[in-house]
Image: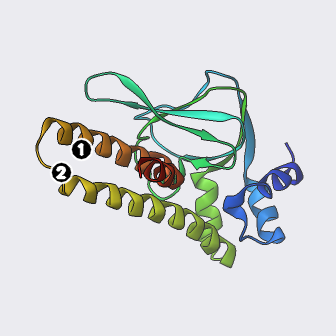
């Protein structure tokens, strides 16, 4: 797919709203499009991370291997969301498995391309890193809020179940960056 087509898709993603047309065109030159069929594993938990994904259309289920051996679906991501972005900052292993649950199109940014852009020292590189930084900060802020709730629970059976659920919610938040998910949940619980 051409850089022009990538540029058109990038302009539809809210995460890039603060970037100029020239900056979006530059980013589009290094990104590539990839389509996934229903059931395709996009990311496998534990594998090395080197790619960030931006969902243009479709749906991706995020699954986490639990300590008891079960695999649990922890959230579903849809168009205009990103995942795998922490791999642009560190090269740690993937923290969850991501599977396309229907036909899905993503734009991919490899860590090597991100490093090249960032190494160029241009203002754009810093703006793009700021986008990732804001996303990670929102994840951490939401996780901290959920963890603070754990500190006030008593050790009753119900409190233990709430604490376990809150810990799983924090894990979901840190993996997916879906801060809106917790805002929705908090509104529904109140």
Query: Which is more toward the observer, 15 or 34?
Result: 15
Label 2 residue SS: loop
Q: Residue at x 74, y 45 (%)?
A: 32
- Residue 2 locus on image (x, y percent): 87, 47
Which of the 4 image quadrants contains residue 30?
A: bottom right
Q: Do the residues labelled 2 and 1 touch (CB within 8 Å)?
A: yes
Which of the 4 image quadrants contains residue 158?
A: top left
Q: Quadrant of the N terminus?
A: top right
Q: Which mark is residue 111?
A: none
Q: In this view, does 51 lie to the left or right of 66?
A: right
Q: Which residue is drawn at 34% across and 22% down?
A: 70
Label 1 residue SS: helix
Report which residue position mark 2 lands on.
Answer: 153
Q: Is residue 103 left or right of residue 48?
A: right
Label 2 vs 1, first from the N-terminus: 2
Q: Residues within 10 Å of mark 2 (few under 14, many from 20)?
A: few
Q: Residue at x 47, y 53 (%)?
A: 187
- Residue 34 locus on image (x, y percent): 73, 36
- Residue 65 locus on image (x, y percent): 36, 29
Q: How far apart are marks 2 and 1 (CA)?
A: 7 Å
Q: In this view, does 101 lie to the left or right of 134?
A: right
- Residue 136 locus on image (x, y percent): 47, 60
Report which residue position mark 1 lands on.
Answer: 163
Q: In this view, does 157 lie to the left or right of 50?
A: left
């Amino acid at each position: 797919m051409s850089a022009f087509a990538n540029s058109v898709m990038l302009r539809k993603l809210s995460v890039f709203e603060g970037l100029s047309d020239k900056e979006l065109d530059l980013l589009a030159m290094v990104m590539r499009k990839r389509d996934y069929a229903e059931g395709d594993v996009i990311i496998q938990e534990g594998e090395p991370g080197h790619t960030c994904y931006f969902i243009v259309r479709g749906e991706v289920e995020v699954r986490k291997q639990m300590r008891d051996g079960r695999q649990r679906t922890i959230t579903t991501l849809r168009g205009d969301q990103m995942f795998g972005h922490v791999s642009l900052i560190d090269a740690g292993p993937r923290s969850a498995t991501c599977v396309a649950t229907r036909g899905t199109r993503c734009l991919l940014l490899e860590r090597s391309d991100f490093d090249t852009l960032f190494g160029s020292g241009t203002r754009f590189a810093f703006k793009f890193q700021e986008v990732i930084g804001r996303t990670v900060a929102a994840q951490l802020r939401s996780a901290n809020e959920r963890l603070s709730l754990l500190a006030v629970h008593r050790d009753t059976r119900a409190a233990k179940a709430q604490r376990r659920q809150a810990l799983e919610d924090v894990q979901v938040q840190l993996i997916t960056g879906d801060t809106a998910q917790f805002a929705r949940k908090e509104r529904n619980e109140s």
